[in-house]
Image: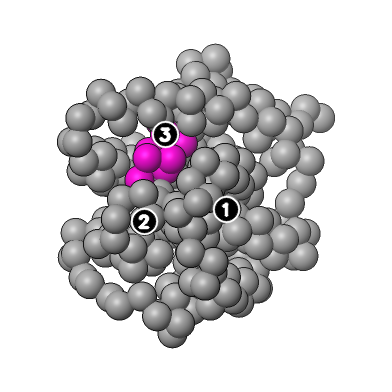
Amino acid sequence: MSLLPDLAPILWLAAALSVALAAALQRISGQGFGMVCAPLLALFVPHLLPTLLLFLGALVGYRAMRADLSAVDMRELPPGMAGRALGAVLAAWLAAGLIGTPLIGFAIAAVVYLAIALSLLGLRVAISGPSLFGAGLLAGLMGTLTAIGAPPMALLYQHEDRLRSAAMQNTFFMFGMVVSLAALGWQGLVRAEHLVTALVLAPAVLAGLALAEPLNRALKGFPARPFALGLSGISASVLLLRSMGVI
């Protein structure tokens, strides 16, 4: 049996483009990878989510974190990472009943809508040990079940300097992807087909990261968030309708 999903070339192209765009947005803003990618890929390869995106997200997070490492405040990492690890373990207990079933589509759509709502609320939450732990815990739950774990941390850092915000979010993002993979692996939900498909799509990740800076210059200060939120909302709505059997 082939370890790659049986997709038409146009669907492979669509998957690669969505991964590249999502990687560029994640590099620029520190968020957006899962929100853009998950609902789109759930239309093509729902049985590979969230594990496929966790592999790809780990690569995105590592490259983005390494580029902005000087802006990372190491003192803020322990509470956020502790919360993320605990959330991943708790989510792994729930994952077996969700992954590989039609419920994954509903879960991804719901998390995307929640993420959009959090982004639009514009709440200001002070960055502290407890808030970092709480955001990490929620991110671990969301990220392990759906590969969309950035919004809680994005809420904390949205009013910070852009470089610091992206650097901190990308660091938590990379750690979260690895921890969520380990938690799903503990439950036997990581398979060879996930890794092989991730390797095939990895060049799209690298292309998106390479295009991030030219894209950032082309935007000339125009915020990427409205575009990411709009695309995520449309994709989530299509996924929800597909999951409901409407389309």
User: Dot 3 surroundings within 10 Å: few (below 14), some, or many (20 or more)?
Assistant: many
Label 1: which secondary element? helix
Please say whether residue 25 is one of the residues in the magenta stretch: yes
Check whether the beta carbons of the residues at disc 2 and disc 1 lie within 8 A of each other.
no
Q: What residue type is labelled 1?
A: Met
Question: What residue does disc 2 label?
Answer: 165
Disc 1 to disc 3, C-alpha distance: 15 Å
Question: What residue does disc 3 label?
Answer: 24
Q: Position of residue 32 (x, y in %)?
A: 38, 46
Q: Quadrant of the rendered structure where residue 4 is?
A: top right
Quick check: can you spot residue 103? Answer: no
Q: Position of residue 202 (x, y in %)?
A: 62, 30
| Magenta stretch bounds | 21-29
Which of marks 1 and 2 precedes in the sequence? 2
User: Relative to 241, is 199 on the left or the right?
Assistant: right
Which residue is at 24% across, 62% downward? Answer: 159
Q: What residue type is labelled 2?
A: Ser
